[in-house]
Amino acid sequence: MWIEVSCVVAVSVLLNTCRPENPRVTTDTGIMEGVENDGAYSFRGIPFAEPPVGELRWNPPVPYTGSWPRVFNAQHFGEACFQPHLPDTNRFIGSEDCLFVNVWTPILDPTAKLPVMVWIHGGDNTIMSGSWPNYMPSEKVAYDTNIVYVSMNYRLQAFGFMTLDLISESSPTKTSGNYGLMDQIEALKWVQKKISYFGGDPKQVTVTGQSSGATDIYALLASKLAEGLFINVWLSSGSPVLSKTTAEASKDNLFFLNNTGCTTLACLKSLSPENITQAVPWFSFPNWAMEDLVTLPKFDEAIGALPVVDGHVLEDEPRKAWRRYKNDVPVLIGSTAQELDFAPPADIVNWTWTDYKKKVKDRLATFSDYVAETALLLYPAGVISPEYQFTTMGAEIRSICGLDIIAMEAALNFRSPIYRYVATAWPSKPTSVFGYSFPAKYAFHAIDVMAYFDTLRNTINPLSPSDKQFQRNIRRAVLSFVRNGKPSAGWGQFEEATALLSERIEFVHGYKVRECQFWLNNGFF
């Protein structure tokens, strides 16, 4: 789990953990020793909850209340939460003992009261972690922005989001699922109690998430359990749909239960994490591998829910819940113009325009010939490349148009301002992200977050002037939002303005209105 190191001996042989030049922070639970890099400091693998194993599997997180009499080694990231090495569901990484936070700070001064950004990673709520390479904060970004950053691990896949009547029956809330959301809330409570030791101000916390991390934050905005834990929210490329109920998800997840061979909760809790993970229907309904999300939708393909409307964490789907209750804070909602370009169909780089039209019809004609033919009129052949048109269409169906509805609902129901942007920047040369081998050419999923965290340089070296200017633009907007609750000067609220972010910033009144109206009118939200 974590390591204590004794510094009684003058010359330590324990991983050099007692060198006087290593940064230290004194907290109410003891002294932590971290890492110094690029002019700033990090403290890694800090437990915020008890290991959710044994009887704590499929239960709300229990806050970590331990302390250490000697020096806590905070130089190494904790284990990722247990997950398959998709697409291979027989290979695994991580551990169930995984509830850790990481802190990056530009200053070792508990009186500094710097703004704080808390990062909730994406990965479909099934994979990745708060220390995923090229997808997390760093000492450099803390130094460059003068912000304290926190990332977290939260339970994933079946351990974080399994909804079953069998589990609900034994739950004190008579619900199940959403354990990953409860972990996120517990980590935010840790920030409120502890971040001042690292120079952060608990009254200036902005929560940010990308992809499923952003979807989770839609739920946190509607959850009474998250009240008072943040003052701003920056969301990038979340799914606009979070509406399945506990009863519906419990029925879907009977496929999982049947795969385990269990009929009792005691049996489920006795299974190894490998057995639990292998029982998940990854590539058959409810399709938790979610491969369908990186192509155009098909009428006969469905994906089961992970976060659910459970009546405990989330009383209703967020956009409806906001009409009665919300954590009313400024919200910045982002998308990217070609979201799917990080992992589209592998042969897309070789498509002709004839191939493009065939692929669109293969997917969308399952809804109707009218939908497929109209889509080809709205996204015609001959524009830039088949890859560009296909991933643009997918982005607008899967993310952009639905997020406009989310932004509209928030603007109607929040007193706080709502801001909207679409990242339209293309990388200066093709680049691979998230471990995929596909060379993304356009405004791919997470290009905005990677630019902010300055991790584009790890896949594009050297950065071009246009890459650097896009990074400056996204940084300027986000930092202004974090510090003032409003992006850069001149940025109007949604629906008055949507910002298009690349090496230039342009403001439009409505983005892809005609296309979005078509998708929304035909039930694609």
Image (tube, rainbow, N blue to C red):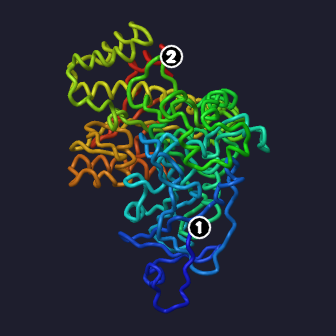
The answer to whether residue 42 is above or below residue 213 is below
- In this image, 123 relative to 473: left or right? right
Q: Residue at x 77, y 43 (%)?
A: 171
Q: Secondary structure at mark 2?
A: loop
Which one is earlier in the sequence, the residue at label 2 or at label 1? 1
**Residue 430: % across, % down:** 23, 42
Q: Which residue in the structure is indicated by mark 1?
A: 196
Q: Amino acid at mark 2?
A: Gly
Q: Secondary structure at mark 1?
A: helix
The quadrant of the picture occupied by the N terminus is bottom right
Asked if one can make out residue 371 in the rendered structure from this viewpoint, the answer is yes
Within-10-Å neighbours for mark 2: few <14, some 14–19, many 20+: few
Q: Residue at x 79, y 44 (%)?
A: 172
Which residue occupies the foreground of this view, 68 or 285?
Answer: 285
**Residue 182: % across, % down:** 65, 48
Asked if one can make out residue 227 in the rendered structure from this viewpoint, the answer is no
Which residue occupies the foreground of this view, 236 or 507?
Answer: 236
The answer to whether residue 490 is above or below residue 37 is above
Q: Which residue in the structure is indicated by mark 2?
A: 523
